[in-house]
Image: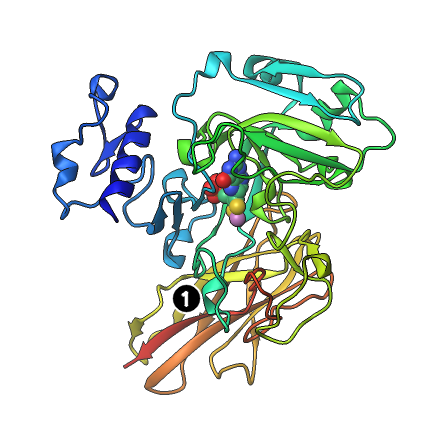
Amino acid sequence: MKKQERRTFIKNTLLAGIATYVGLPMVYAENFPTGMEPIGLLDKTLPIALPGKSDKMTVLNDRPVNAETPAHLLDEELTPNNLFFVRNNGIPPARVDVDKWTLTIEGESASQSKTYTLQDLKTKFKNVTLQLTLECGGNGRSEFNPPAKGNQWSTGAVGCAAWTGVRLADVLKDVGIKNDAVYIGYYGADDHLSGDPKKQSISRGVPIKKAMEAESMIAWAMNGQEIPVLNGYPLRLVFGGFPASCSGKWLEKIVIRNKVHDGQKMQGQAYRTPCKPVAPGTKVKDEDMCIIEEMPVKSLITYPQTGATIQLAQTLPIRGHAWTAAPTIKAVDYSIDFGKTWTSCTLIAGKNRYAWQRFEGEIKFPQVGYYEVWARATDANEDRQPIILPGWNPKGYLNNACHRIAIKVV
Ligand SMILES: Nc1nc2c(c(=O)[nH]1)N[C@H]1C(S)=C(S)[C@@H](COP(=O)(O)O)O[C@H]1N2
Ligand SMILES: [Mo]
């Protein structure tokens, strides 16, 4: 990390009152003089810990913060808060006063403008807890060739948590939705990287039909705890099945629009793929790019860790999760012969729609050697993961190729 970047990063985390130094909170951080660097951090050999996050995460960037989760650390039914991936486009709000936090709903297709405190949301509407999978549209980007610019996510920009909050539909209905509503857009309290208060780092949204789904939420808790600062504390949107970029963090405002929301990163090439497939490397005009809506079927092997060694006499248990925007996952199969034959796994039903589903299998290997275990999910729409790579696209979105792990049988 460059010195200037490091300084800004430290200053920002300090201001947030959430500075962590090798995983510990910095006590009395509010007294620490601005412009001074903690002596511990001047020692470049010490790792910088992300606030509220495990040091086992892979940090891709620290300004803005982007970190993903190694596959074997996603083995639990629900992703622990300290292991849930982070994708920030800007700088999280410096200070959050929960008691003063408000959410305003307005827009040309809202019958009125209405502002709620967190307490209002918690008490006026039915509280729900749902297991929802969030996956960044760019997860898997690192495999595309020619490479696409942006965070080089491998497989870990995904997680599934139990989110507690209210249904977005209940709140929108309380405000009143005009007949001409087509989209909702969000605004969060994070700052643009430039520091310009007039600029948004990101302001995306979803079609009104998606907003009104029973699983579309405004959440204040994650796995029964406060949402980590880096994941949107104290309030965020959560939409399963759509790119996670739609799930606005540090949520302050929702606009009900009479046209497709035109906020930051809704236009141009961002979060869009070519409307018609293109050859790898093709430059595609903005008007030929379409907004990503439903995320494709996908799965991840979370046990064992890639590279595991087993004895020939042993049976290898495997497991992982599969998810889709379709109503359910229908099947997960595995192959140990590079896709020639497939064996079906046991599949466990999800708690609710958009929860990822556990799959399990047991493998007996025929002889000593190097193997790969490939997993392939098929959903209720009969959509199935491609073995190698799906269609190339300029920004490297939607890579739902089969996950592969290496196994040594000795
Ligand atoms: N306000 C705000 N919301 C945001 C973002 C952001 O930078 N600012 N990033 C988006 C993107 S691109 C993704 S993939 C998800 C990531 O959510 P997570 O960091 O909680 O995993 O948040 C989305 N919501
Ligand atoms: Mo994202």
The answer to which of 234 and 11 lies nearer the viewer is 11
Residue 107, image x and y in percent? 73, 25
The answer to whether residue 22 of the structure is visible from this angle is yes
Snapshot quadrant of residue 137: bottom right
The answer to which of 204 and 85 lies nearer the viewer is 204
- Secondary element under disc 1, as helix, strand or loop, is strand
From the viewer's perspective, is 105 left or right of 361? right
From the viewer's perspective, is 164 left or right of 172? left
Q: CB of residue at label 1: within 8 Å of ligand 1?
A: no
Residue at 25% of width from left, 37% of height from top? 7
The answer to whether residue 162 of the structure is visible from this angle is no
How many tags in the picture?
1
Residue at 29% of width from left, 77% of height from top? 311
In this picture, is 190 found above or below 395?
above
Residue 163, image x and y in percent? 54, 34
In this picture, is 219 found above or below 241?
above
Residue located beneath label 1 in the image? 317
- The amino acid marked with disc number 1 is Pro
Which image quarter holds the C terminus?
bottom left
From the viewer's perspective, is 138 left or right of 154? right
Snapshot quadrant of residue 26: top left
User: Quick one: label 1, few (<14), some, or many (20+) residues within 10 Å?
Assistant: few
Q: Residue furthest right?
A: 179
Query: What colour scheme governs how the chains and residues are painted in the rendered image of this protein?
Result: rainbow
Residue at 57% of width from left, 36% of height from top? 248
Residue 228, image x and y in percent? 41, 32
The answer to which of 5 and 361 lies nearer the viewer is 5
Residue 71, image x and y in percent? 40, 58
